[in-house]
Image: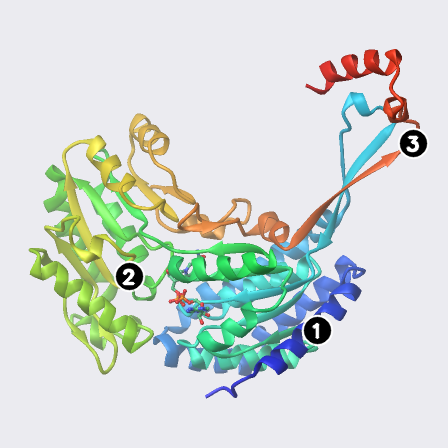
Amino acid sequence: MPKTINFEEIQNIILSHKDTAVKLKRTTYKDRIKKLNSIVSYLQDRNNEQRLMEAMKIDLGRHTVEVLLSEIGVINNVAKYIKRNLKEWMKNERVATSISLLGASSYIIKEPKGSTLIIAPWNYPLQLGIVPLCYAIAAGNTAVIKPSEYSTATSAYMATMIAQIFDPKEITVVQGAVEETKILLDLPWDHIYFTGSTMVGKIIMKAAAERLSSVTLELGGKSPCIIDKSANIASVAKKLTWGKFLNNGQTCIAPDYVLVPNKMKSSLVAELKKEVKTQLDPKGVGSQANEDYGHIVSDRHHSRCVSLLEDAIQKGAIIITGGEYDAISRFFAPTVLDNVTDDMKIMQEEIFGPILPIIGYTSKEEVINIIDNKPKPLALYIQSKDQKSIAFFLENTTAGGTVINDFMIHYANPHLPFGGVNNSGIGKSHGYYGFQEFTNERAVMRQRFGATSLLHPPFTSRSEKLARILGKWLS
Ligand code: NAD
């Protein structure tokens, strides 16, 4: 168990971070890149890598390949991308000046926000703390990371890692649960970067409002997958099985439920059954015996998944494949459900587990209605070869991000903003957008020979004429 931390200790941390933040403002891109390099080198060390693999096994039963790709690989790529672009991002940005302000020049300074708090969830427990940290460092901030209390082995790993690399007066990890987070939230952060559920996101935003700290809220929600009649069902089923069941469905942008034309439902069901077996039970001994498959993070989340399944079955859902679970090992089989209706709990909250409801539809309008009746999703997936159909679904829905004919790959493109919309999130991250979230874009205007003094009082008929002319130009 991590040592509990009290208000005084946390307050001392933020006081020291406030002092450090002033100094960090003057750091160069080279200073910041050095810090990013130290994170990458730490993770490249074979002993450190081994300890991380062990921690991930304890927390989520993760296979090495998954950890290499979705934790270490993601952090490396983010650090690499930042290093390639940081010099450019940090430069003052010259902008045009309106003609009515002739004689002045304008530019934007990219200054760090200051002392920042990063609150991370448990599903990708290292990278969801370290990736925002990379952007906080790139923008020149101090940071406190509060990892999740549900992934304690990885949280402890992160605390050791950060303590070995950084001065705690600049970057530190505070382990703990809700109590510790509440204490942290009671402090005057310049920015809070939260990744987690919509429900807790609201608590974070309320607390931030007390101090008027700016926030990034990377939240969750129900991300639909729309299959239209032109889609290649075999190819969709292959990608869908991967997207849904990766990390036991505990991925914020995992497809939550599927909408498929009624006529194509039976072929989707058959292909999904086949793919679940091929990908998650290749030896035919059951997915529980498959070491690659992993488990649910905690007893609480396991019983939440069980109750979603039981409620659906009770209200008429049919299990196509899966449905088995084991509370002791927190195993939950990859499960596909048919006959799902909107009154089931499984259609009302984010599933965040390995259960895939399939819903048949007859018209596109029906699809829009189902999606519109729920909060705006973090991701929306369209599987179609028909341009008109793709355009229809794009125009009639909204989402933080959309992938056409695949799943989740938008997360890996740093040229795209990543984030939600309203209920699924506020603010964007990744690439320049990540740097921007931790940056105060300070507007600077420098006056040289401008004639604004002609408009100072006392007003004359000449100033009135000038005001009329400027009024036209300004509009
Ligand atoms: P969570 O909201 O329960 O917890 C996230 C963090 O908030 C944890 O560090 C936790 O200690 C803290 N917390 C929990 N309750 C709190 C409270 N009452 N007051 C203050 N702090 C509190 O989320 P989770 O279960 O860890 O993660 C799953 C959720 O995160 C899902 O909804 C998922 O979609 C979302 N998520 C979003 C993204 C994204 O990038 N948008 C990425 C991963 C996960």
Q: Nearer the viewer, mark 3 or mark 2?
A: 3
Disc 2 marks which amino acid?
Phe
**Residue drawn at 73 percent across, 17 percent down:** 471
**Residue drawn at 93 percent across, 27 percent down:** 449
Taking 78 as reference, is 259 left or right?
A: left
Disc 1 marks which amino acid?
Leu
The spot of residue 237 in percent (x, y) is 23, 50
User: Which comes sooner in the sequence, label 1 or label 2?
Assistant: 1
User: Which comes sooner in the sequence, label 1 or label 3?
Assistant: 1
- Give the image quarter of residue 13: bottom right
Cα distance in 3D space between marks 1 and 3: 40 Å
Disc 3 marks which amino acid?
Arg
The spot of residue 399 in percent (x, y) is 39, 42
**Residue drawn at 29 percent across, 29 percent down:** 389
From the image, tell me which residue sits under label 1. 15
Cα distance in 3D space between marks 3 and 2: 61 Å
- Location of the N terminus by quadrant is bottom left
Q: Which mark is residue 448?
A: 3
Looking at the image, do the residues carrying marks 1 and 2 touch, with CB atoms under 8 Å apart? no
Q: Nearer the viewer, mark 1 or mark 3?
A: 1
Q: Is mark 3 within 8 Å of ligand 1?
A: no
Looking at the image, do the residues carrying marks 3 and 2 touch, with CB atoms under 8 Å apart? no
Cα distance in 3D space between marks 1 and 2: 43 Å
Q: Is mark 1 within 8 Å of ligand 1?
A: no
The spot of residue 352 in percent (x, y) is 30, 61
- Location of the C terminus by quadrant is top right
The spot of residue 281 in percent (x, y) is 21, 68
From the image, tell me which residue sits under label 2. 245
